[in-house]
Image (spheres, rainbow, N blue to C red):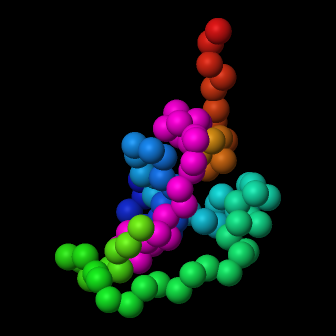
């Protein structure tokens, strides 16, 4: 899932998912609590070709949340359930 106007990026080991903080916070107390914590300021200095700040915690100025030990499929399933109200359980 990648929304060009998304304002948060969730990162697995292999993929990035650009989504909306507000929707995640609305449907998940875990995300709501996480987003309520103070954020580190954007670093001064390096920027990418689009002019946005880029470092390990930001991409073009958008915060990146690293989802440690979560698979791409797990994150995609979570996002589909939270953002679209759709989910499917794996068939045994």
Answer left or right for 59 relative to 64.
left
Write down the region rendered in magenta: 57-77
| Whether residue 65 can be seen here | yes
Q: Which is more toward the observer, 87 or 66?
A: 66
Q: Which is more toward the observer, 19 or 59?
A: 59
| Residue that lies at the very extreme toward the left in this rendered image | 49
| Residue that lies at the very extreme toward the top in this rendered image | 92
Q: Is residue 40 above or below residue 6?
A: below
Q: Position of residue 27 (x, y in %)?
A: 74, 55
Asked if the stretch drawn in magenta spans residue 71, the answer is: yes
Q: Which is more toward the observer, 54 or 9?
A: 54
- Residue 20's image quarter? bottom right
Q: Residue at x 48, y 46 (%)?
A: 12
Q: Is residue 72 above or below residue 41?
A: above
Q: Residue at x 64, y 60 (%)?
A: 23
Q: Is residue 56 above or below residue 1?
A: below
Q: Position of residue 56 (x, y in %)?
A: 41, 67
Q: Residue at x 73, y 74 (%)?
A: 36
Q: Position of residue 17 (x, y in %)?
A: 46, 52
Q: Residue at x 79, y 58 (%)?
A: 29
């Amino acid at each position: 899932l990648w929304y060009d106007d998304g304002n948060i990026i969730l990162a697995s080991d292999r993929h990035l998912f650009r989504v909306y903080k507000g929707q995640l916070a609305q449907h998940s107390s875990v995300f709501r609590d996480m987003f309520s914590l103070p954020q580190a300021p954007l670093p001064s200095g390096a920027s990418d070709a689009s002019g946005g700040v880029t470092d390990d915690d930001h991409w073009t100025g958008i915060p990146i949340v690293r989802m440690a030990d979560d698979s791409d499929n797990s994150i995609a399933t979570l996002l589909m359930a939270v953002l679209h109200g759709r989910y499917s359980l794996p068939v045994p």
